[in-house]
Image: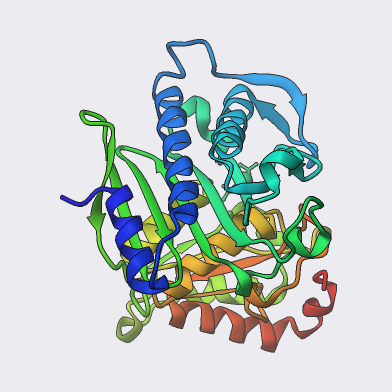
Amino acid sequence: MKTLVEFIWEQQEQHVGYATGEFSRLLNDIGIAAKIVNRDVNRAGLSGILGSEGTVNVQGESQKKLDVLANNEFIKALRNGKQCAAIISEENEDVVVFDEKTTENAKYIVAIDPLDGSSNIEVNVPIGTIFAIYKRKSLGKIITTEDVLQAGTELVCGGYIIYGSSTMLVYTTGHGVNGFTYDPTCGLFILSHENIKIGETGNIYSINEANYIYFAEGVKRYIKYCQEDDKASNRPYTTRYIGSLVSDFHRNLLRGGIYIYPGTLKNPNGKLRLMYECIPVAFLAEQAGGKASDGYKRILDIQPHHIHQRVPLFIGSKDMVDKAEEMMRIYSPGFAKLIED
Ligand code: AHM
Ligand code: MG
């Protein structure tokens, strides 16, 4: 049995050559907050924390009580840990910058969606936390734009916690993807899924097809392709869509498949946020041998211009994403220009 903490230290020594303990501490702090959020999610119906907070976040979405609670827990854990200088969160309009005494020696910036898929909270469907860790570019008292707006290629770590039938923490630091299952009897995350690889192809496609009429022609063609009868390529594929990115991505990661949240003419950048939703899962997908794209280019190559920027997402098994990109190039070549650069 290897715990998350043991594994983090081991990996740091193996790949960085030395371990100052700073990154390990940071990741461990995320694990601690995850345990608290896990407890709250599990007991939500009993402790009166289901339902809306009565506020809206910067995206204009109603905040659930658990959204706010999870956000507070992660911020608290990262502030206390002192390794993180600032946080970009789905629930905060501006960057949360910790006070100067804390930030001076803190080397990391964290982007986080504290509770993704929160519209599913009331109906007991798996939800998750998505996080991305960057190293600060500048060191000093002031957090710069350069520290905050970093492309996915600069990522130090990407991961998620899925609060499902069991709770798991899955992360990568660029040396493969590993998953840890939470054992509530001893309060530890234990390595359960070592070196996760996604199949080069799969037979699951995940997309909110109710929006079909608004999709670009390339997306429509790809959906039709998934539904065609062709034994050689195992089509028709099967549809699975939970409506919770972490859960849909986690299933496809383990089984092989593609998840798409495309743009539409009205919202060319789609719904999902680049910095704390798409970039971390894109890093995981690539590290597992898969692919992540906005339909035309690699997600990790996109330079963010603002912290809550949205981007279309095509992610999963490499061959499936390649095929979807091909359809976008052939049938919707002009759509690329509508996506924010
Ligand atoms: P959220 O961050 O407000 O929870 O929204 C993101 C979620 C994703 O988890 C999920 O894949 C998507 O929204 C579902 O959207 P839709 O209901 O439009 O299919
Ligand atoms: Mg989200």
Q: Is residue 24 left or right of residue 338?
A: left
| Residue 21 in the image: above or below residue 196 | above
Q: How many marks?
A: 0
Q: Quadrant of residue 51?
A: top right
Q: Depth check: give the residue in front, 79 or 36.
A: 79
Instruction: Pick the quarter of the image with the C terminus.
Output: bottom right
Query: Is residue 220 among the parts visible in the rendering?
Result: no
Q: Position of residue 289 (x, y in %)?
A: 40, 78
Residue at position x 39%, y 54% in the image: 170
| Residue 263 in the image: above or below residue 272 | below
| Residue 100 in the image: above or below residue 307 | above
Residue at position x 41%, y 19% in the image: 43
Q: Position of residue 208 (x, y in %)?
A: 58, 54
Query: Is residue 67 among the parts visible in the rendering?
Result: yes
Q: Depth check: give the residue in front, 257 or 130.
A: 130
| Residue 180 in the image: above or below residue 37 | below
Q: Quadrant of residue 223?
A: bottom right
Residue at position x 39%, y 67% in the image: 18
Q: Depth check: give the residue in front, 86 or 325.
A: 86
Q: How is the image coloured?
A: rainbow
Q: Residue furthest left?
A: 1
Q: Position of residue 310 (x, y in %)?
A: 74, 58
Q: Position of residue 309 (x, y in %)?
A: 77, 58
